[in-house]
Amino acid sequence: MSTADMRRSPVSATGRPNPVDIHVGSRVRLRRTLLRMSQEELGDAIGLTFQQVQKYERGANRIGSSRLFDLSRVLDVPVSFFFDDMPVVAVSSSPNSTPGKADAPIDPFEADPLAKRETLDLVRSYYGIANPVVRKRLFELAKALGNADDI
């Protein structure tokens, strides 16, 4: 494998995808799912097959900058969305990670709660409540229950 091929490949020497590519792909899947968009619909919107979208979402294929820009427009999020909440494990285990002067330590966390199906179902149900007053009351109730341990 040439040096140029190694730079393009999302797979490390261990045969596993780069953790950053996996995280970015999971954020694509999260947003697509929140929008109730199928992989086929997303692929059609950016000129790809649903199989290619699957590979992006698994991190098996790296997403180039122009494609990431297209995804951000179709999914209606800023490009930074795909890198938000990146676990420190992904940053530190990326083969080419070299900390910069502006890098601040990131607090590690177990699992991204936004990537769970339960979270997606909860958000869908919440926005399915047509009455804004009821939706606001549910929001306040959830906040109060979440802070119940602080009392």
Image (tube, rainbow, N blue to C red):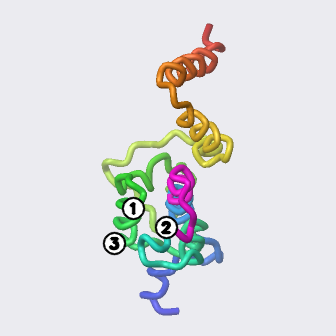
| Marks 2 and 1, how far apart at CA | 8 Å
The part of the chain drawn in magenta is 28-41
Q: Secondary structure at mark 3?
A: helix
Q: Residue 31 colored magenta?
A: yes
Nearer the viewer's eye, disc 3 or disc 2? 2
Residue at the disc numbered 3: 66
Q: Residue at x 62, y 40 (%)?
A: 119
Rendered position, 118 above or below 126: below
Q: Is residue 55 left or right of residue 70?
A: right
Which residue is drawn at the image coordinates 52% and 31% (left, top)? 130
* Marks 2 and 1 in Cβ contact (< 8 Å): yes
Q: Quadrant of residue 17?
A: bottom right
The residue that disc 1 covers is 74
Secondary structure category for the residue under label 2: helix
User: Mark 3 is on which residue type?
Assistant: Ser
Residue 127 in the image: state x and y as whole percent.
Answer: 53, 36
Residue 64 colored in magenta in the image: no
Q: Position of residue 148 (x, y in %)?
A: 64, 13
Instruction: Choose between 112 and 133: the one closer to the eye.
Output: 133
Single out the mark in the foreground, 1 or 3.
1
Q: Mark 1 or mark 3, which has the lower sequence index?
A: 3
Q: Is residue 93 visible?
A: no
Q: Tell me whether the residue at label 1 lies in contact with that at label 3, contact meaning CB atoms closer than 8 angstroms.
A: no
Q: Residue at left 61%, top 12%? A: 150
Rendered location of residue 131, percent (x, y): 51, 25
- Total marks shown come to 3
